[in-house]
Image (cartoon, rainbow, N blue to C red):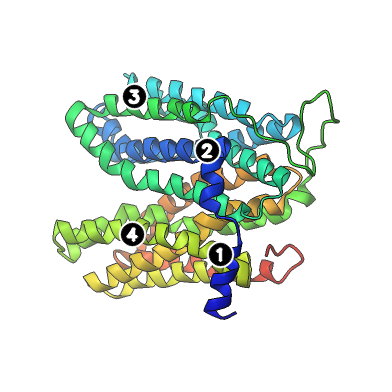
Amino acid sequence: MSPELAAADVAATPSALRTVWNSPLYRGATVALFLSGLGISAAAPQITLFLVDDLHASLTTAGLYYLTNITAPVAGYLIGARSDRTGTRLGFFRLCAVAGFLGWCALAAAGQLWMPFVISALVLAFAGAASSQLFAAVHDDLEATASATGDGVVSIVRMALTAGWIVGPVAGSLLATAAGPRVMFAATGLCTLAQIVPMGFSRARPARSGAHETVASQAVPERPGLRAMLPLLTFTALYVFVYAGEPIKYGYLPIYMHDDLHLPTAVSGAIIGIQPLIELILMPVAVIVARRIGMMRLMVLGAAFGVGANLCFALTGNATGMFAGQILMGGVWGVFAALGIIVAQRLLPQAVATASAIFMSSTAIASALGGLTGSMGVDLLGLPHAFLAPALYGLIAAGGIAVMSRSRHAVS
C-alpha cells in the first residue's frame, strides 16, 4: 500500500485519541494505568536497597525477594477467572487497588526481614491484577460499541502504563533520597489506591458476544479448558522468553558500562533512557503497521529486534553499540507493549479477563527466569557475553511466534 493510501485510510478512521478523550471509561483507565506504572516503577528499584540497608539482608537474600513474584500469575488467574464468571471487571479492579494500597503500606511499616516476602507473595500478588481488569473492561466496552478504533484505543491506554514507567524511577529515587524508602513505599500505596479516583463510578458495558449485565440475567459461562487456553499459554510462554532479557539488562548493563566501558554517567543515563522514548514513539506506529501485515508477523520482527539488541550488548563493546542495542530494544517493546494484550485477549475471546491476567502476570515469571539466567550467565560467561543468553531466548521466541503466525491460531 502506498503512503498516500495508508494516510487516507488512517484519516478515514475515527481518531483513537478522540475516542479515548470522549469516553469516561477509556479516559479513566488511561489515567489509572499511568498512576499504576508511576507507583510500581518508583518502588521497584528501591526494594533491594531497602532490604539490605534497612532490614540488613544479604545481597543474596535480597535477590530472592523477586521470586515472590511467582505467586502473581496464580492470583491473576484466580481473579481473572472469577471476573469472567461474573462480568464484574471494575469491581475486582477496585478490590485489587485497595489490596495494593494495603500491601505497600504494610511494606512501608515492615520491621522484620520476613515481612516483605510474605506481603509480596500474599497481598501484592493480587494488586497486580488491577491492570488486567482494566484492560478486560476496555475490551468489553469496545466489543459492545463495535468501535472502529479498538486497537488504537488499547494502544493508547497501554502507552499510559509505559509513560508511568518512564517517570516513576526518577520520582521514586528523588523521594527515597529526600524522605527515605518507607515514605516512598507509602507513596506507591497512595498511587495504587488513587487509580480508583479517575475511574469514578464508571461501569463497562458488557461485550455483545458474551459479557454479562448481571449474574442473574444470564447463565454463568464455563471456565475455559486447557485445550482452549493452549494457544494463549503458548503465546504467553514465548512472551516470557522475550521479556526475560529485561531484568538481565537492567541488572548488568549499567555495571558493564560503568566498570568495563568506563562511560560517563550522563552517557550511561542517556543510553538507558532512550529505550522508553523509542518505545512510546513506536507504539502507535506498531498498531498501524500491524493492520497491514498482521500482529503476529510484526511480533516476529519485534522478537528479532531483541536478538539484535542483545548481540549489540554482547559483542560491540562501545557506547555506539549500547545506543544501538537500546534503540532496537525500544523497537521490541514498541511492538509488544502495544499489541501483546490485544493478541492475548483474541486468543481466548470467551474469557478476556483470564487472558489479560495470565498475559500481564507473565512478567513476574520472566523476571524470575531473567534473574536466574543473568546470575548463571555472569558466572559462566562473564560480562558482556552473558547477554548472549537473552539473545538465544529472543531467537526461540521469534521462531515460536513465526510458527503461530502460520497456524490456525494466528491473530491478524
The x and y percentages for residue 7 are: 54, 71
**Point 56% across, 81% down: residue:** 2
SS at mark 3 in the image: helix
State the SS at label 4.
Answer: helix
Task: Return the residue at label 4.
Answer: 378
- Callout 4 amino acid: Val
27 shown above or below 375: above
| Relative depth, front residue between 313 and 305 | 305
* Mark nearer the N terminus (1 vs 3): 1
Residue underneath mark 1: 11
Could you tell me the amino acid type at mark 2?
Ala
Which badge, 2 or 4, comes first in the chain's sequence? 2
**At which x and y percent is residue 196?**
50, 27
Asked whether the residues under the numbered discs 2 and 3 touch, taking CB atoms below 8 Å apart as contact, a structural biologist would say no
Question: How many angstroms separate mark 2 from mark 3 (CA)?
Answer: 22 Å
Q: Amino acid at mark 1?
A: Ala
